[in-house]
Image (cartoon, rainbow, N blue to C red):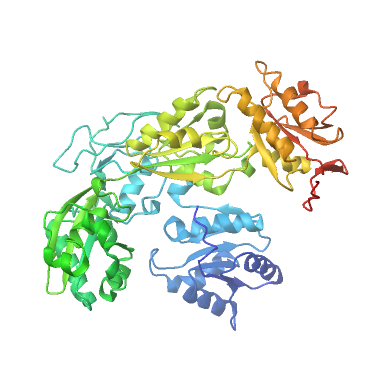
Amino acid sequence: MPDLTVTTRIGLVAATTAGRRHADTVAAAWPHARLVEGDTVADALRSAWAGSDAVVAFLATGAVVRILAPLLGDKHSDPAVVVVDEAARHAVALLGGHAGGGNDLAEQVGALLDARPVITTATDAVGLPGLDTLGWPVQGAVAAVSRAILDGEPVQLIADADWPLPALPPNVQPPASPADGDTAGGDTAGGDTADGDTAGGGAAVSGYRLLVTDRVVPLDERTAVLRPPSLVAGVGASRGVPAEEVAELLHRVLAEAGLHPASLRCLASADVKADEAGIRSTADVLGVPLVTWPATRLAVIDVPHPSEVVRAAVGTPSVAEAAALLGADGRAEHATLLVGKTATAMATVAVARHVPRGRLAVVGLGPGAPDLRTPRAVAELRRAAVVVGLDQYLDQVRDVFRPGTRVLSSGLGAEEARARAAVAEAAAGRAVALVGSGDAGVYAMASPALEYADERIDVVGVPGVTAALAAGALLGAPLGHDHAYVSLSDLHTPWEVIERRVTAAAEGDFVTVFYNPRSRARDWQLGKALGILAAHRPPDAPVGVVRNASRPGERVHLATVATLDPAVVDMYSVVVVGNSDTRLVAGRMVTPRGYRWRS
């Protein structure tokens, strides 16, 4: 879910004391929200509509509808509008829906005011991604194709390449065989899904089509087109080139090649052109970034039309073609030059198509409780077409998955297999979420996955609340100063190494957190580790054991270094051993921040 509260201008309108109180709460929390005044409430609402990106009205829904009805334009340009009732029990996404951010704003208003968000957009209501929410331009019969998807009618998904789309329901499938030259080999994954089996490509031919392409294609009343960010236009120019000349050349080159400008990922050029107004303003009008490269980087790219004249002028035999191939990420080996350099008097343009990259989100689910799961984690789970994880962790979040999500689950001890499976799915061009409990980078799945991930994959890390943090909150404030995390599992780390690390933590007087502290097969390591710490701690140094933090069966046990019985600890526990300054205050472990150094 995008955070609309950070940069979006939000106009707040209220008529009553209670409404103003709720508006003040929003304004205090969100830096770009402000209360809009007027001679009447209607005037205030009209002013907020004209001067804001979004409006939150603490008014009756009917009144808001009557006032705003004459002002409505279209969903792409109108502000999002959320209506909140007098008691702040509901936050109604009235206008803007998913395309304009109204649904997200209703969710965020609801979270702030403890109000229930009311979402009536059809796709959001049933958990499907709206075609205009994928972050790409969408054209054609969007409403008709969306309705067909909602109604379960067959929709052909025809893609030029394997783009990492979110999960789509089983009625959206590639055709059984390429038809009429519409596809260059695109495909989607079949297999087990969150709501049953997905057919492997044998859906009945339907008049409805969802195309994913950067090419100009004929449109009809049953075809929608998603424009993936596949094209990079390399631009070279003489100093002082007019923006009109750059723009006219670029659009002519794209049109002659049958390519759509909505699929432009960026413009690219040489560093010496970074401040060229004609190039930069063209990028601004197109709404894409301008990426520039040093001449030394451009000079090593093999291009079909090098020029010694250009080399003498800027230090590289090619600007437009080399920059188009380098694109935004510098991976020329993953790009194909579609249009060689084409020049006018002062500008040169070349166009390359870049291979899509798979997407791997490594997601920390937190310690278990749904309310300790971050909104970003939920958004990534709903963004994924494939979710990979330990079966018991996946069971915690199955209600979040979109219809059509393919789920790859496995049991304990299969960490490496899960990591390999997630990377393989992402390398095939899919949007994948690999889940772990707590934070996925802390004794979890991030490390094994990233050992196998290569440059074909975009990796997104989603932090989560760790077991140590959840345990620390239950114990009090044991982590208030320097602390060390040590896993006592010697399945992958020799005990001699673990022992050295525990000794270092003891000698450094770190608060020490033990993960994987004790199991039926490993029942002596915790006692040995406590003995090492006891040699450097007073015998009454507090020890906290938290089992199933934030989950059913949660239990907190307090003891000391001298009295802790390892038998109360198992693999569902986190053990926190205080340092020499940690003490119990009103039954809570506290490590003072004002550390008293000892000689």
- State the image coordinates of residue 165 (x, y, percent, origin top left): 36, 43
- State the image coordinates of residue 351 (x, y, percent, origin top left): 19, 57
Residue farthest toward the bottom in the current orientation of the protein: 39
Foreground of the two, 300 or 570:
300
Visible residue check, residue 577: yes
Q: Is residue 350 shown left or right of residue 451?
A: left
Q: Is residue 264 shown left or right of residue 83?
A: left
Q: Is residue 53 shown left or right of residue 176?
A: right
Visible residue check, residue 220: no
339 in relation to 190, above or below:
below
- State the image coordinates of residue 299 (x, y, percent, origin top left): 21, 57
Residue farthest toward the front in the current orientation of the protein: 599
Foreground of the two, 266 or 76:
266
Instruction: State the count of labels.
Output: 0
Foreground of the two, 363 or 153:
363
- State the image coordinates of residue 534 (x, y, percent, origin top left): 80, 30
290 in relation to 568, above or below:
below
Quadrant hosting residue 58: bottom right
